[in-house]
Amino acid sequence: MEIQRPIPTHLITGFLGAGKTTLIRHWMSRKPADENWAILINEFGEIGIDDHLVGTPETRASGLTIRQVPGGCLCCSAGLSLQVALNDLIRHVRPDRLLIEPTGLGHPRELLQTLSGPGYQGVLSLRATVTLVDARQLQSQRHREHPIFNDQLAVADVIVANKKDAYTQKDRDALTAYLSQNNWQDKPLEYCQQGKLPLDWLSQPSGFTPERRHSVRRESAPSDSIWQDTMPDFPASGLIQRSNEGEGYYSLGWMIEPARLFDPEQLKTWLDGLNMERVKGAFITSKGIFGYNRAGEDAQWWPLDEISCSRLELIDANPLPAEVLEVGLLSTLSGASK
């Protein structure tokens, strides 16, 4: 790959619901007009939603190109899924800047090892790894003891405590103590809300040191074409369901044919009532197109410009009852019998 100068490359990591997508949307809105950015998004779920929540039909025209790789961890499937998507962006887009958002259950150290490896020397220029954290998650032993949660903080060049407006002083003290306990107290710590981190952080250097022995766990790439840009062939039911499991979490998702319209009020009420760690979707309703994003009790519902079909992704630490949830989802369709 002939590159005139190495592409500044930024890893935006953080556990489920920390606000990675919100931060990227904020930076996108402030992108210099003369720069061409590429954004590579990895999702734990198999359906693929974040490109709908991040982008608009005008993104490419405004110097933004978005690619997504659903169905697992970019870090683990670096031998195929990552390299295919990444190489395509480098060859055909030739971005001035590259932002990579791995799944909240991804292994960032292994991804950094790949990005700094021989295949991308002279092509990519690693910049500061930004790790977002919701300080309230430290109240959960499951989060504090999760190896990925800690690995994300360990590789951070800057730690961003997002959603600061929801913190108590106890939350702030707990974060400070946790960082000190793990010898991370010298890492820059920024507090922000709604991912509003200044663009200045894009100029900060990376402190990552590659290991001599390149050791990357490998898993199979997504086995079918559901994650491609083309519209799938829907069965008579009008739904395609996919699931995934790993790192102590489960995902369950659906694609719904675009002819099926949701009742927005009923849909939002149903989504708000789901008791699980992560709920996100993009929906075609009888009153327009909307995005939904909820982590814990923090929910967002906003209008979208255009999507190919409705999509929903659920993630939780407990197995998800597919049949019960699908019945609930279908009950929110416009005109559905109750």
Image (cartoon, grey):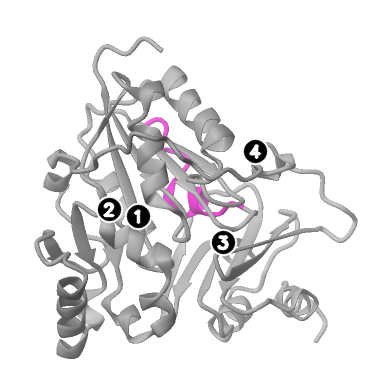
Sequence-first tag of 4 and 2 = 2
Residue 193 vs 222, above or below: the answer is below
Sequence-first tag of 3 and 1 = 1
Q: CA distance from mark 4 to mark 1?
A: 23 Å
Sequence-first tag of 2 and 1 = 1
Please, what is the three-letter code of the amino acid marked with disc 4?
Gln
The disc at residue 155 is: 2
Sequence-first tag of 3 and 2 = 2
> Residue sitting at 41 percent across and 62 percent down?
148
Q: In the rendered structure, does residue 164 fall within the stretch colored magenta?
A: no
Q: Residues within 10 Å of mark 1 (few under 14, many from 20)?
A: many
Q: Position of residue 143 (x, y in %)?
A: 40, 76
Please, what is the three-letter code of the amino acid marked with disc 1?
Thr
Please, what is the three-letter code of the amino acid marked with disc 3?
Gly
Q: Magenta stretch: give its range.
A: 48-61
Name the residue that disc number 3 marks.
288
Most common secondary structure along the magenta stretch: loop
Please, what is the three-letter code of the amino acid marked with disc 2?
Val
Q: Residues within 10 Å of mark 4 (few under 14, many from 20)?
A: few
Q: Residues within 10 Å of mark 2 (few under 14, many from 20)?
A: many
In which image quadrant can residue 151 be found? bottom left
